Amino acid sequence: MTDPTPRPPAPPLPSDVHATLRRLFLPDGYVVNGLIGTVEPIALSPGDPLWIDQHAPREYPADAPGEAGPEERYIVHIYSLVTGDRLLTNNLPSSWWEEHLSHITREERISWQHRPNTWLVTSHYLLISGGLWWRTPAPEGTLRYLSQTAFRDHLIAENTANRARWASEYADAVEALRPSWATDVEFYGVGERPEGITFSRIIGAARIYLEYSLPDENDPPHPAALAGGFYPVMTEPRIELPAAGGDGLTATEAVGIAHALQNAATLLLLSQPSKA
């Protein structure tokens, strides 16, 4: 019976691959097959000559005055395995993609295209994903795009700066609210003000935590507001088990967690003020 599963044509031997690309292939005479669903796309090494920069904006001339251009676009660099030349992918018809990537589904192709600087190989071509790029404001007559990676890195840097600023701005409130058992403090939220703060401590497999929230600056102060305007989200600290997954526990793991819970509960009870 014929196997109905589409399969990529057999790739050429490394000796047939152009010298500029040959380093990417295994030394035992066979080409690595980046078949999604069977073998993960293969990552380029940072600094490789084929590496696609993720932080420099990409600019294209608009085809017509006032043209907005697509909101997003995927970047793919395609090289001939035999000549080493790069193809102009913006002129390739959809039939080309269907012919050369017929062995993977559309969903698998999109998944790969979201992973910049990973590559696949067909019988004739090396395809390198440049990831997803989004359109940003640009001068008239120009289409400018930034990569998803650049946007992500910008948000991470912005959030890191915000948290450092919040830590300085709310230092007095942190010290006023910090429970005696807490060793870790984390602000959460985005923007100019934090949305809340979490105090926590890890004891073995258990995590103790206590959360406070901060109303929006346009909202009236919370009736239970404490230092810095924060108010408690919960009436008392909670204990969670981050390491306890859904696959069950061995006896040794259960005993360890039981000890961690006992130690965490004891710490909380001892830290509470005496009612005498």
Image (cartoon, rainbow, N blue to C red):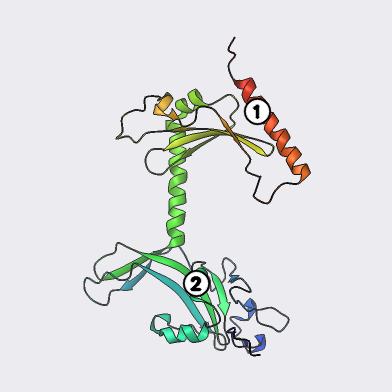
Residue 265, label in figure? 1
Q: Mark 1 or mark 2, which is nearer the start of the sequence? A: 2
Q: Residue 171, relative to residue 93: is it above or below?
A: above
- Label 2 element class: helix
In the picture shown, does residue 171 fall above or below 50?
A: above
Give the labeled residue for mark 2.
107
Residue 237 x, y percent position in the rendering = 56, 29
Asked which quadrant contains residue 199, the reply is top right
Q: Which numbered marker is on residue 110?
A: none
Instruction: Residue type at mark 1: give it.
Output: Ala
Quadrant containing the C terminus is: top right
Image point (49%, 25%), residue name: 177
Relative image position of residue 84 (x, y in whole percent): 54, 84
Name the residue located 52 percent from the left edge and 78 percent from the top edge.
127
Where does residue 204 sit, x and y in percent of width and height?
A: 69, 37
How many numbered dots are placed on residues in this image? 2
Amino acid type, callout 2: Glu
Q: Is residue 239 left or right of residue 217?
A: right
Alpha carbon of mark 2 to alpha carbon of mark 1: how far?
Answer: 48 Å
Of helix, strand and loop, which one carries label 1?
A: helix
Q: Nearer the viewer, residue 126 or 227?
A: 227
Measuring from the top left, give residue 197's x and y in whole percent: 48, 35
